[in-house]
Image (spheres, coloured by chain):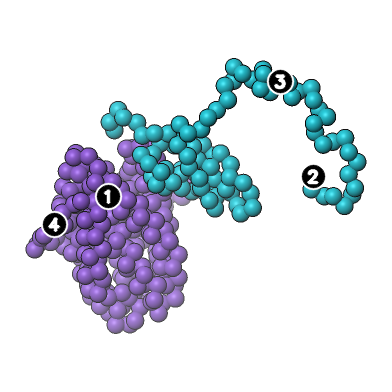
Amino acid sequence: MNKELYQYILGIADNSLILGQRLGELCGHGPTLETDIACTNISLDLFGQVRSYFQYAAKIAGDGRTEDDIAMLRKEREYVNVLLVEQPNTNFAYTIAKQFLFDVYHLAFLKELMKSTDLTLSAIANKCIKEVSYHERFSSDWLIRLGDGTEESREKIQEAINDLWLYTDELFHMTDADTKIVEDGIGVDLTLLKDVYYQNVSQVLEQATLDTPDLKYFHKGGKQGIHTEHLGYLLADLQYMQKTYPNMNW
Amino acid sequence: MSDKNWPLWEVFVRSKNGLEHRHFGSLHAADADMALENARDVYTRRNEGVSIWVVESKYITASNPENNGELFEPAQDKVYRHPTFYDLPDEVKHM
């Protein structure tokens, strides 16, 4: 088993899994019927992508574990998503700000992953990129609407951007698995995405009449399995059925 | 949500090229761009369409059901307006 490749795939897929689960919480609770459906659609897109990644990871692991085992049966410390995606929805501004800050990264990442010499990964990236282009369009549009909206909406979205900004730098941290997989010509060198990311984000923030935060210190740890207190609760929801009724199928 | 509702929009979807747009339903949106995106999410998520039109409901002028008598009933006994009284040559397939 190629341990680094396996770990690399988890790194990609866990971001989509945890963000997808967060968005899924809005099912039936979105601010309007239309945004409720939009958010759960995006959630389902992300879960679909996760399936492709975990099917591949299960094949690489080759020890009988299935995609579901990998998704559902790990412990908190074994999830390697970035801290950004596990942050709570708090209010619609936070949901949009989190989605936007991730989407801009996700799109840039997939554009590079499409060039991977690993044909399975480049095929998955090829398939995902249309979905993620729409996600980015959706979250950018809403960011601009809220920022350039009423006084109240502007205040809320600025607060959400300021709070979540702390988690953006981690998107570009390279783990050992990342470095190894980049050397193999399979992975994406995240450090090369950083400048373009902040440029693109600032551009939309400007359009939304919002200030780009100026921070020197950032949170990190998700990629090493050290999470904020929010992930445990999220996993309790996600894993409930499999923990209560092990090996349950439907 | 505030008590101010977004305006209502009617959604028309073309299910495949060559067919006409059909009325699919309605939704709420703040403006035309949002109406299009909402329509995409609400009405085409199961691969129903290749093209979407949205129009704000207030721009649709509808006939009044009270006037149905004068508008539609006179046509009921004029079956000869259907082109079914002609012998069509077999070569004409689509009439």
Chain B: colour as depicted: cyan
Image spot of residue B43 (x, y percent): 49, 44
Image spot of residue A32 (x, y percent): 35, 37
- For image coordinates 39% across by 56% down, the residue present is A134
Tag 3: residue type? Glu
Tag 4: residue type? Pro
* Residues at discs 1 and 3 in contact (Cβ within 8 Å): no
Q: Which residue is mark 3?
A: B73
Is disc 4 surrounded by few (<14), some (14 to 19) or many (20+) residues within 10 Å?
some
- Mark toward the viewer: 3 or 4: 3
Depth order, front residue of B27/B87: B87
Q: Which residue is mark 4?
A: A213
Residue B95 has which mark?
2
The numbered mark, 2 or 3, whose residue comes first in the sequence reads: 3
Distance from disc 1 to disc 3, alpha carbons, whole Å, reads: 52 Å
Distance from disc 2 to disc 4, alpha carbons, whole Å, reads: 66 Å
- Mark toward the viewer: 1 or 4: 1
The numbered mark, 1 or 4, whose residue comes first in the sequence reads: 1
Q: Is B7 located above or below residue A60 in the figure?
A: above
Element under label 4? loop
Same-chain check, marks 3 and 4 = no
Numbered disc 2: what chain? B
Visible residue check, residue A185: yes
Numbered disc 3: what chain? B
Q: Which residue is mark 1?
A: A144
Tag 1: residue type? Ile
Is disc 2 surrounded by few (<14), some (14 to 19) or many (20+) residues within 10 Å?
few
